[in-house]
């Protein structure tokens, strides 16, 4: 990754896919590459940082906390995802904290360069709009589940969000998600989530594997 020029790196980022050669060249001059260690804060809720950050490698977590330090996990970001755009667009402090889960290589584009390339490139602006709309859809579903669902339904939805088909045709959550993280995703206590998971297991809605993955049974859908 470190051998690639800024221009080559830009070509790998979907957000910049529609830039013309001259726009790419001017942005390539403005971007800075930065490596974040594991568990480092990229942007902090309530603070300003004046840049757009694009994740090239690694994984980061978006969280929001209240004044008592209670935290909710809003999303996990992967390569190609970007962050910090909200603060650049409305000029307010960051809406959430983004912290790396593992080492991340990140591209940083400063406020001025961001402001320069947006009006010149409507498809990039459209990409950002689409990303914000998708996030609003997701947030609407989350509000709905918080208001209308019990913890069973919320845990079921969270598990389904992380699930994918394995080679055997099973729907499976491969990465081990701690009860604590699951609790922070669904807005419930760790104890409550542990109880719900145990019950779901006993009643055959899910099946934990020895490697930490969880097989999802079709009937889990009935809870969502
Ligand atoms: N619900 C969410 N899903 C994904 N990313 C988010 C979410 N909320 C905030 N972010 C990102 O986290 C960033 C925090 O700083 P900003 O508010 O500048 O921009 C925010 C977005 O890029």
Image: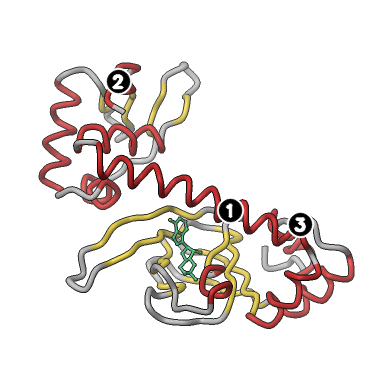
Q: Residue under circle 3?
A: 123
**Closer-to-camera residue (91/80):** 91
Q: Residue under circle 2?
A: 222
Q: Is residue 13 above or below residue 23?
A: above
Which of the 4 image quarters holds residue 79? bottom right
Q: Is residue 220 left or right of residue 60?
A: left
User: What secondary structure is marked by label 3?
Assistant: helix
User: What secondary structure is marked by label 2?
Assistant: helix
**Closer-to-camera residue (15/6):** 15
Q: Is residue 166 left or right of residue 150?
A: right
Q: Assess mark 1: CB under 8 A from ligand 1?
A: no
Q: Residue under circle 1?
A: 131
Image quarter (top left, top right, bottom left or bottom right) of the C terminus: top left
Image quarter (top left, top right, bottom left or bottom right) of the N terminus: bottom right
Q: Assess mark 2: CB under 8 A from ligand 1?
A: no
Q: Label 2: how many residues lie within 10 Å, few (<14), some (14-19) or many (20+)?
A: few
Q: Label 1: how many residues lie within 10 Å, few (<14), some (14-19) or many (20+)?
A: some
Percent across and percent down for residue 184 are: 26, 52
Q: Is residue 8 left or right of residue 199?
A: right
Q: How many marks?
A: 3
Percent across and percent down for residue 183 are: 22, 48
Label placed on residue 12: none
Percent across and percent down for residue 129 are: 62, 57
User: What secondary structure is marked by label 1?
Assistant: helix
Which of the 4 image quarters holds residue 170? top left
Question: Rounded to the nearest whole Å, what is the CA distance between mark 1 and mark 2?
Answer: 29 Å
Closer to the N terminus: mark 3 or mark 1? 3
Closer to the N terminus: mark 1 or mark 2? 1
Residue for point 73% across, 80% down: 30
Q: Label 3: how many residues lie within 10 Å, few (<14), some (14-19) or many (20+)?
A: some
Percent across and percent down for residue 214 are: 31, 29
């Amino acid at each position: 990754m470190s051998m690639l020029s800024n221009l080559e790196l830009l070509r790998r980022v979907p957000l910049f896919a529609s830039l013309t050669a001259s726009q790419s060249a001017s942005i390539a001059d403005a971007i800075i590459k930065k490596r974040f260690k594991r568990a480092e804060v990229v942007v902090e809720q309530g603070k300003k940082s004046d840049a757009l950050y694009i994740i090239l490698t690694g994984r980061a977590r978006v969280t929001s906390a209240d004044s008592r330090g209670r935290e909710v996990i809003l999303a996990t970001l992967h390569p190609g995802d970007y962050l910090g755009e909200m603060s650049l667009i409305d000029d307010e402090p960051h809406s959430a904290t983004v912290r790396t889960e593992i080492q991340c290589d990140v591209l940083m584009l400063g406020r001025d360069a961001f402001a320069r390339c947006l009006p010149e490139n409507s498809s990039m602006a459209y990409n950002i709009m689409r990303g914000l709309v998708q996030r609003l859809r997701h947030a609407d579903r989350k509000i709905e589940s918080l208001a209308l669902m019990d913890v069973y339904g919320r845990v079921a939805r969270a598990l389904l969000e992380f699930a994918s088909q394995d080679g055997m045709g099973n729907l499976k959550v491969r990465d081990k998600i701690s009860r604590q993280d699951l609790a922070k995703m669904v807005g419930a206590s760790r104890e409550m989530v542990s109880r719900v998971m145990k019950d779901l297991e006993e009643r055959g809605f899910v099946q934990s594997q020895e490697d930490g993955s969880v097989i999802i049974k079709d009937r889990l859908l009935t809870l969502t």
